[in-house]
Image (cartoon, coloured by chain):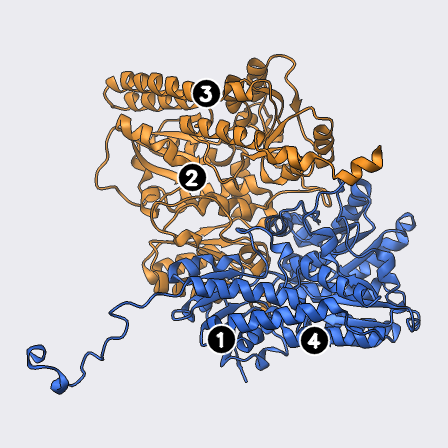
């Protein structure tokens, strides 16, 4: 349906895309007592840290191997070792998640090999988990970094026993980077409503949901515990949310022989129906009354809101999985997905209900939105919105000029209902009232019908 | 050569810290070796970008992978009175092909696209780690592009791995000195023209001071780099005097402009009341020394007297509400003591101040203002800060964004006084605003409510 195009420009203007390593780092932040570390120059970490701090309004633990010029040229493997020792001494995390960067990938450091030797030399650190993921800045995007980090964690941290989950009343939820802490809370509540315990992985709802902790901690606080990850093979089923979680789900299936179901959509009436139906079948319990009621509320919201969506032109700039959610949902509500810009490849792109999907930037979004009614993208869309005079709904990462990003979700009937109202209200608020000049005749219309005085 | 440049910047004779060092120590440089696993803060590229990005009408093009620009663009609080082009994020967003084959052609084409689409007076090209490793010669590409397109294309050679932010600030200054300053002549100049160096116009704070200068008939030829236009920077060598703000970042510009163009400068600050007055005096003195009429000094004193009286009166209005409140001041350093007197005037007690980046001179000044038992904090981990608040030894924290959670998560008030802040704190106006913000924060009724435990917690205790 959609033609997938790549920008032909040399210069990216107003980037939509963020880099792989910080996508990986955010996945690590969803693990309890973790210290993410970028193997690169210290700026690589500083930019990501500031970005997350402003998005979540939380202190962000994140470290760097602080590559100097000499280390960059001669190889920086020793920096990894000294960084691990340093972090271990200062903050005692349960896990250090290491992401490579453009700097160290250009040199081609063999980190896996180095870590093997490091392990052998430091048996005292056996209880410290280390996960490495290759995330060069010059390839892919944020979502790819998240995806790879999750697959690496499954590969390293899950215990590879045979599947033992039958009748355990536990399920695994592999969550993509397009989901917010609010979404993760929602899916966990859903599972609980069916009597299912859920291991949400990675779980940024524990660590980055904006709460006031009792104690100060230098590592991530909350998030998936390592023991829970190790025991993921003991769940009845794995549910993967977002196409980006397929590599992790595959890795888990390979390791434990466990089946998985992948939901590429969590937003909307049908998507939520599917999700609840799956939970109902796994648990053998009927869908609880509260969700039947919420479903009915969403249906009513859609009925009330569709007047505002009908025929409206909407431009979306988002990473592939979020674009897939939003593009389909906008289409389902009767609006037209006029412009779709994304950051990286995905098998979903060609199926998005739009003439073209462009791997591009926010300049492309801006030039494709001249006659649109609404922009849907992250906070960096604000300049385009201002210049075009088109309302912007901020969604995705980063949202640094509005509060509460962690508490707004799209998942479940309530997530969809919230988004439906937010967007409908924006569209309603920007409708222009009709004036006497709203319906002019064409300028060159034949004058034969006009009275003589006007025909002059 | 980049390494020569770095050496040159390190041995800066104008730097007061350098003056106390031996030849050998100077050569070693002033950036501490970064500790893997224990480092915080930005890289040299970050520093260079921060220093130059406030030049408003220029296209700032980052040559590197998406991380360098994509993760950080449009996140600075500088303000422009004109062009908004500086807020547009331009990057070559290099791919594996560029890493393998080199990215020079990609860079050249990017420059052309920018000139065709946005027609800026100049393009600044920032080098980053990966193309520096690959060996892309951005100086050569910029030279070729300048010749081909007839527009200045300025290389800023400050890849992240060469050091920390501060070094990048200085390398950015070198780029201006080498390629921009003195390349154009102004239509006219007056004996009342000054440069302000090292002021970034965060939250528009330059405009809190500009009316004072306007009132005295003093013209800002160029502010480097807050709210600057490219042509102003190019013509800034015709100013008669200069003020250097925030000493650590751009001292090389001030000193070399003195060397090359005989523009005398002084190191001053518009942060704090006495500092503002002293800076105004210094500006007038330098200008009179360079040919301005001597009556400028009297007009300056008259303005200072009038404005100081006005500001003390306005701050005094807050004294009844702020008397005895305990403030912990945690900033970059130089700024620490310049606000202490204003806080004291409003009746507050400064219980501690950071001296992490302060010189010994700064520390003396702190003792002078706060007394011998001034609590000077060299460095503090977030955990230590957290416990400081837990023990209720301070009522409010004034700091940069990074340490905000030490206060907020302890249900303690915090006011942002670093780069990312929303409020402007320059000049006389700025001190009133700072005291007003502290008052608003301290007396927000929200604190009482959030500090109350939940009723069931109370019940469970009893």
Q: Quadrant of residue A301?
A: bottom right
The residue carrying pointer 2 sits among few (fewer than 14), some (14 to 19) or many (20 or more) residues within 10 Å by Cα, namely many
Secondary-structure class at tag 3: loop
Is residue A102 in sight in this rendering?
yes
Contact (Cβ within 8 Å) of mark 3 with mark 2: no
Q: Determine whether, in the image, residue B5 is placed left or right of residue A27.
A: left
Contact (Cβ within 8 Å) of mark 4 with mark 2: no
Q: Determine whether, in the image, residue A157 is placed left or right of residue A47.
A: right
Of B99 and B340, the residue lying toward us: B340
Q: Quadrant of residue B334?
A: top right
User: Distance of mark 2 from mark 1, alpha carbons?
Assistant: 43 Å
Name the residue that disc number 4 marks.
A273
Contact (Cβ within 8 Å) of mark 2 with mark 1: no
Q: Are marks 1 and 3 on the same chain?
A: no
Q: Which mark is residue B317?
A: 3
Of B316 and A453, the residue lying toward us: A453
Q: Which mark is residue A335?
A: 1
- The numbered mark, 4 or 1, whose residue comes first in the sequence reads 4
Is residue B294 in sight in this rendering?
no
Name the residue that disc number 2 marks.
B201
Which subunit holds the residue at mark 2?
B
Which subunit holds the residue at mark 1?
A
Q: Residue at x 50, y 79 (%)?
A: A356
Q: Are marks 4 and 2 on the same chain?
A: no
Question: Color of chain A here?
Answer: blue
Residue A406 vs A140, above or below: the answer is above
Secondary-structure class at tag 4: helix
């Amino acid at each position: 349906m959609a033609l997938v195009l790549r920008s032909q420009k040399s210069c990216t203007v107003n980037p939509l895309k963020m880099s792989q390593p910080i996508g990986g780092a955010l996945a690590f932040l969803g693990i309890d007592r973790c210290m993410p570390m970028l193997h690169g120059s210290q700026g690589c970490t500083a930019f990501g840290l500031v970005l997350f701090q402003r998005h979540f309004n939380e202190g962000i633990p994140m470290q760097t191997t602080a590559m100097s010029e000499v280390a960059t040229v001669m190889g920086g493997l020793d920096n990894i070792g000294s960084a691990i020792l340093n972090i271990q001494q200062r903050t005692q995390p349960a896990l250090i998640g290491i992401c490579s960067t453009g700097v160290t990938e250009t040199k081609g450091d063999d980190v896996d090999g180095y870590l093997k030797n490091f392990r052998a030399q430091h048996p005292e650190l056996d209880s410290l988990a280390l996960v490495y993921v290759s995330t060069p800045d010059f390839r892919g995007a944020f979502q790819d970094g998240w995806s790879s980090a999750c697959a690496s964690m499954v590969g390293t941290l899950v215990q590879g026993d045979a599947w033992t989950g039958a009748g355990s009343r536990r399920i695994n939820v592999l969550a993509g980077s397009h989901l917010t802490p609010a979404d993760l809370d929602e899916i966990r509540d859903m599972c609980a409503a069916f009597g299912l315990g859920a291991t949400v992985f990675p779980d940024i709802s524990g660590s980055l949901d904006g709460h006031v902790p009792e104690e100060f901690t230098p590592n991530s606080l909350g998030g998936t515990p390592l023991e829970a990850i190790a025991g993921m093979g003991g769940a009845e089923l794995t549910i993967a949310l977002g196409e980006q979680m397929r590599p992790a789900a595959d890795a888990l299936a390979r390791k434990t022989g466990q089946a998985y179901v992948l939901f590429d959509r969590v937003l909307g009436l049908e998507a939520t129906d599917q999700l609840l139906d799956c939970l109902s079948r796994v648990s053998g319990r009927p869908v609880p009354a509260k969700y039947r009621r919420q479903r009915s509320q969403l249906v009513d919201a859609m009925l009330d809101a569709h007047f505002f969506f009908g025929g409206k032109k909407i431009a979306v700039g988002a990473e592939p999985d979020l674009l897939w959610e939003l593009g389909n949902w906008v289409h389902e509500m009767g609006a037209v997905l006029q412009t779709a810009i994304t950051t990286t490849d995905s098998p979903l792109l060609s199926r998005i209900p739009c003439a073209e999907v462009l791997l591009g930037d926010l300049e492309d979004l801006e030039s494709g939105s001249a006659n649109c009614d609404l922009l849907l993208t992250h906070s960096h869309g604000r300049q385009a919105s201002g210049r075009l005079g088109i309302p912007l709904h901020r969604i995705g990462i980063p949202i640094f000029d509005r509060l509460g990003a962690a508490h707004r979700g799209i998942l479940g009937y309530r997530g969809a209902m919230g988004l439906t109202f937010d967007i409908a209200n924006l569209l309603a608020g920007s409708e222009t009232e009709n004036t006497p000049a709203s319906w002019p005749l064409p300028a060159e219309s034949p004058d034969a019908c006009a009275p003589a005085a006007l025909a002059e | 050569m980049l390494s020569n440049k770095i050496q040159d910047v390190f041995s800066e004779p104008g730097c007061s810290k350098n003056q106390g060092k031996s030849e050998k120590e100077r050569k070693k440089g002033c950036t501490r070796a970064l500790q893997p696993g224990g480092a915080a803060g930005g890289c040299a590229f970050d520093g260079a970008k921060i220093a130059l990005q406030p030049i408003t009408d220029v296209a700032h093009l980052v040559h590197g992978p998406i991380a360098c620009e994509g993760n950080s663009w449009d996140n600075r609080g500088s303000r422009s009175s004109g062009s908004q082009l500086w807020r547009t994020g331009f990057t070559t967003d290099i791919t594996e092909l560029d890493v393998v084959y080199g990215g020079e052609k990609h860079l050249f084409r990017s420059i052309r696209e920018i000139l065709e689409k946005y027609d800026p007076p100049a393009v600044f090209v920032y080098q980053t780690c990966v193309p520096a490793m690959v060996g892309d010669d951005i100086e050569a590409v910029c030279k070729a592009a300048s010749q081909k397109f007839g527009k200045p294309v300025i290389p800023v050679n400050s890849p992240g791995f060469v050091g920390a932010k501060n070094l990048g600030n200085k390398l950015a200054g070198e780029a201006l000195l080498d390629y921009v300053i003195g390349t154009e002549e102004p239509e006219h100049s007056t004996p009342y023209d000054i440069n302000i160096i090292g002021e970034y116009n965060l939250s528009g704070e330059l405009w809190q001071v500009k009316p004072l200068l306007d009132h005295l008939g003093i013209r800002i030829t160029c502010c480097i780099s807050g709210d600057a236009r490219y042509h102003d920077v190019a013509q800034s060598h015709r100013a008669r005097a200069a003020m250097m703000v925030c000493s650590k970042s751009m001292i090389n510009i001030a000193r070399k402009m003195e060397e090359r163009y005989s523009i005398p400068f002084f190191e001053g600050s518009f942060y704090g009341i006495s500092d503002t007055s002293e800076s105004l005096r210094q500006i007038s003195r330098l200008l009179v020394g360079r040919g301005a009429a001597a009556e400028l000094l009297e007009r300056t004193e008259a303005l200072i007297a009038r404005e100081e009286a006005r500001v003390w009166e306005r701050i005094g209005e807050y004294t009844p509400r702020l008397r005895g409140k305990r403030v912990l001041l945690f900033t970059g350093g130089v700024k620490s003591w310049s606000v202490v007197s204003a806080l004291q005037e409003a009746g507050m007690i400064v219980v501690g101040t950071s001296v992490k980046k302060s010189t010994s001179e700064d520390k003396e000044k702190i003792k002078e203002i706060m007394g011998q038992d001034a609590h000077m904090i060299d460095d503090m981990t977030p955990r230590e800060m957290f416990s400081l608040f837990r023990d209720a030894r301070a009522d409010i924290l004034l700091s940069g964004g990074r340490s905000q959670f030490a206060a907020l998560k302890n249900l303690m008030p915090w006011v942002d006084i670093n780069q990312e802040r929303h409020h402007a704190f320059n000049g006389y106006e700025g001190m009133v605003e700072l005291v007003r913000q502290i008052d608003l924060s301290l007396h927000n009724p929200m604190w009482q409510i959030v500090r109350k435990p939940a009723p069931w917690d109370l019940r469970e205790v009893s």
